Image (cartoon, rainbow, N blue to C red):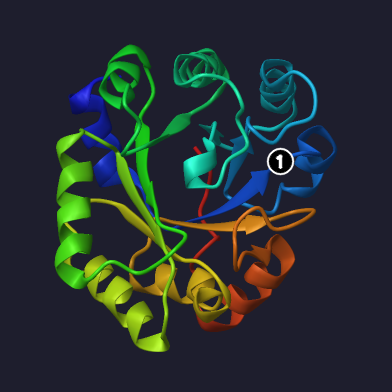
Amino acid sequence: MKKKENQKYRMKLESRIVATLGKDALRDVSLAMEADMIEVRLDLIDGDPLEAIRSIRCNTSLPLIATNRWKAEGGNFKGSEAQRLDLLLKASEFADFIDIELNAKLRSELIAQINKPAIVSYHNFREMPCPEDLRLILQEISRTGAAIAKIAVTPASLKDNLMLLELLLEADMPLCVIAMGELGSHMRAIAPIYGSALTYCYISGAVAPGQMSLWDLRQVLKIISPDVGNLKHD
């Protein structure tokens, strides 16, 4: 799916709860049905990841995000970069979205080959970029033709979280922001109120710093923002 198709998804997407499946993906898929979407972490799955995502596709009608993270951005894939992206390309057959890192060397080539909308993501597990750098990152993602931008950073103070909320209010494309770690945990529930396109949670165990469980996230959102997560699936 080329740039025109990605732009179509930019206009359609609303805030959704994404349940991330990792090591025990095949066991946990039945527990993820209360989410709006499912992220399949190919790099964390025990066994054949292609067989796993094929099986998950057969067992849910929820939209699937295929993700294959490298170590530099919190992943566990141990092969070459070409092998990593080839696996993501093959997995895209069973997914509705693919997630590819902004800094991946073959990002443009992969997006050109995959007939699905792309989530282009940036992760920083060390720090919070300044507001000017956050805007530059978002601009760079926008130029890739991504359907959704995803920026996950690590706040050093509660004030840092406010910069992410401001970025959401300014964004001119679907944007998911994630504040990783203890200081940002509450942002999993707060960011959707400010327009974050996606908010991620876990089923069996957190796969990123500060993640809430699906059930905890549902409970918090039910109180503070009941419209999030109550969308009808096409």
Residue 138, can we see it? yes
| Left or right of residue 111: residue 215 | right
Q: Pointer 1: what residue?
A: 22
Q: Which of the 4 quarters of the picture holds residue 223?
A: bottom right
Q: Residue at x 21, y 35 (%)?
A: 7
| Residue extending farthest right | 27
Q: Quadrant of residue 30?
A: top right
Residue visible at 71% across and 47% down in the picture: 33
Q: Residue at x 15, y 55 (%)?
A: 136
Judge whether 60 appears above or below 156 on screen.
Answer: above
Q: Residue at x 62, y 64 (%)?
A: 211
Q: Is residue 24 above or below residue 222?
A: above
The N terminus lies in quadrant: top left
- Count of numbered circles in the view: 1
**Relative to residue 3, is residue 228 drawn left or right?**
right
Q: Is residue 226 visible?
A: no
- Amino acid bearing label 1: Gly
x and y percentages locating residue 127 in the rendered image: 39, 68
Mark 1 nearby-residue class (10 Å; few <14, some 14–19, many ≥20): many
**x, y percentage for residue 201?**
62, 58
The x and y percentages for residue 12 are 31, 44
